[in-house]
Structure formats: structure tokens, C-alpha cells
Image (cartoon, rainbow, N blue to C red):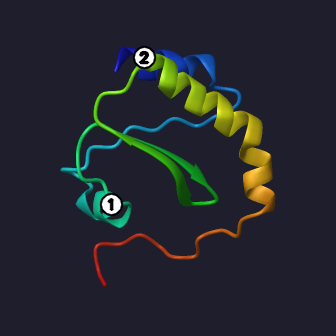
Amino acid sequence: MPYFENFAQEFKNSAVFARMNIIKNPWTGERYGVQGTPTFKSFCRGRPVWEQVGEIDPFILKTAVENMIIYGEDCIRKSTPVGQTITGYM
């Protein structure tokens, strides 16, 4: 958690960091296939494009964030947004 919070502060002008309680938000966790905690995900236009489940070396997490910042625009140009609304109902 301290690394996540530090990176959120360090990259606050380039990336959005969010933390979610999947017990209070089970539909969102289910929608994105969260099977364990912690789960780190990077998104491009609403689609997960990178994931790490479980403990992660801070260097790997920081590198993943930096790569999304560097290559994120390319990802956006080559992707279309996800159009579904996340709800608890099918």
C-alpha cells in the first residue's frame, strides 16, 4: 500500500490511481475478473490491458505505470471505448 500511494502521488499529473473494496463493490470485481487481492490493473478506454494479482515488486509496478504513461496514447488511438455500464444486474 505505501508504494501504491507513493506512485499515485508521483504520477498524479499523468495517471489516475484508484483503490476499490471488492467486498463493497462485488459487481465491479466480478466484471473485471478480480480473483484475489491485491489485484493491480491498467486500463485503456475501459479495457484492462495489464494485470498483476498478488504481491508485486514495487519496481515492476512502477515500470508498468511508466509504460502505460509512455504507450497509453498509442493504446487509445488503437482502441474503442467499452460501452457497457457496470451494474449488479444482468
Query: Where does label 1 land, which residue?
Result: 33
**Residue 66 shown left or right of residue 21 in the figure:** right
Which part of the image, by quadrant, shows the N terminus?
Answer: top left
Instruction: Classify mark 2: helix, strand or loop.
Output: helix
Image coordinates for residue 55, horizontal then vertical, percent? 30, 28
Q: Residue at x 31, y 84 (%)?
A: 90
Could one spot residue 8 in this view of the protein? no
Query: Where does label 2 land, which residue?
Result: 3
- Up-down relation of residue 72 to residue 12 (above or below): below
Q: Residue at x 43, y 23 (%)?
A: 4
Q: Looking at the image, do the residues carrying marks 2 and 1 touch, with CB atoms under 8 Å apart? A: no
- Up-down relation of residue 30 to residue 2 (above or below): below
**Residue 45 shown left or right of residue 86 in the figure:** right
Could one spot residue 7 in this view of the protein? yes
Residue ranking furthest to the left = 23
How many numbered circles does the render carry?
Answer: 2
Q: Residue at x 26, y 44 (%)?
A: 21
Q: Residue at x 25, y 50 (%)?
A: 22
Amino acid bearing label 2: Tyr
Q: Nearer the viewer, residue 30 or 9?
A: 30
Q: Nearer the viewer, residue 68 or 13?
A: 68
**Residue 36 shown left or right of residue 14 in the figure:** left
- Up-down relation of residue 59 to residue 44 (above or below): above
**Residue 74 shown left or right of residue 63 in the figure:** right
